[in-house]
Image: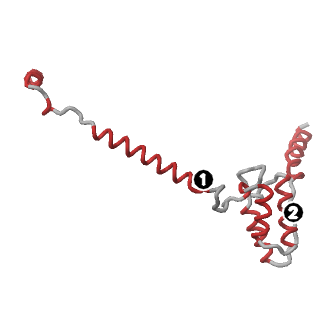
Amino acid sequence: MTRWFTAAVLSLGLTGVAHAAIDAYEFKDEAERARYGQLTTELRCPKCQNQDIADSNAPIAADLRKEIYRMLGEGQSNQQIIDFMVDRYGDFVRYKPALNARTWLLWFGPAGLLLGGVLVIATIIVRRRGKRSPDANDLSDEERQRLAHLLDKNHE
């Protein structure tokens, strides 16, 4: 009975491995293989969103890898392939989108937020320093006498 249970658990565990696809592409030289590797790690999977298409197991990532392989075989440049992917999926497909009118907020937004935060903190600090706390020198004669009396009482 234990053997049947172990066999069932192992077979269920291996079903995920059986469905995993491995891309086996033939390249004409190592330079083309390097270009393929660079392009697949530079482009983001539209479904997974935080994973490049080289590491993603999503069906769309597999389709994009096939498309890149096909375009490399046709002799297209890296820029042509990237432009095709951007035209099809938008600037989101790139981890480092080009600086243009649509992506300036993406590039400069974090720096703007950081600068805004620094300005808010600086304003708060300046305002707090502007408010003076009451000093012992600002006490009236009556308050000084009372303070002296309290201090003398504590020493006795």
Q: Residues within 10 Å of mark 2 (few under 14, many from 20)?
A: some
Residue marked by disc 1: 105
Q: Position of residue 136 (x, y in %)?
A: 15, 32
Name the residue rendered at 88%, 72% in the picture.
26
Q: Is 75 left or right of 50, judged from the image as shown?
A: right
Image depth: mark 2 or mark 1 in front: 1
Q: Nearer the viewer, residue 29 or 97?
A: 97
| Colour scheme of the rendered structure | secondary structure
SS class, disc 1? helix
Q: Is 96 left or right of 116, judged from the image as shown?
A: right
Amino acid type at image mark 1: Leu
Q: Using the rendered view, name the quadrant where residue 133 is placed.
A: top left
SS class, disc 2? helix
Residue marked by disc 2: 66
Name the residue rendered at 87%, 66% in the picture.
24
Q: Position of residue 37 (x, y in %)?
A: 76, 68
Q: Using the rendered view, name the quadrant where residue 76 is placed.
A: bottom right
Q: Nearer the viewer, residue 90 or 15?
A: 90
Name the residue rendered at 87%, 57% in the picture.
21
Q: Earlier in the sequence, mark 2 or mark 1?
A: 2
Of the 4 image quadrants, the one containing the N terminus is top right
Number of residue marks:
2
Q: Position of residue 116 (x, y in %)?
A: 47, 47
Of the 4 image quadrants, the one containing the C terminus is top left
Separation (CA) of disc 2 from disc 1: 32 Å
Q: Nearer the viewer, residue 96 or 12?
A: 96
Above or below, 121 relative to 143: below
Q: Using the rendered view, name the quadrant where residue 55 is placed.
A: bottom right
Above or below, 110 relative to 150: below
Q: Dots 2 and 1: beta carbons under 8 Å?
A: no
Q: Nearer the viewer, residue 66 or 78?
A: 78
Q: Position of residue 39 (x, y in %)?
A: 75, 66
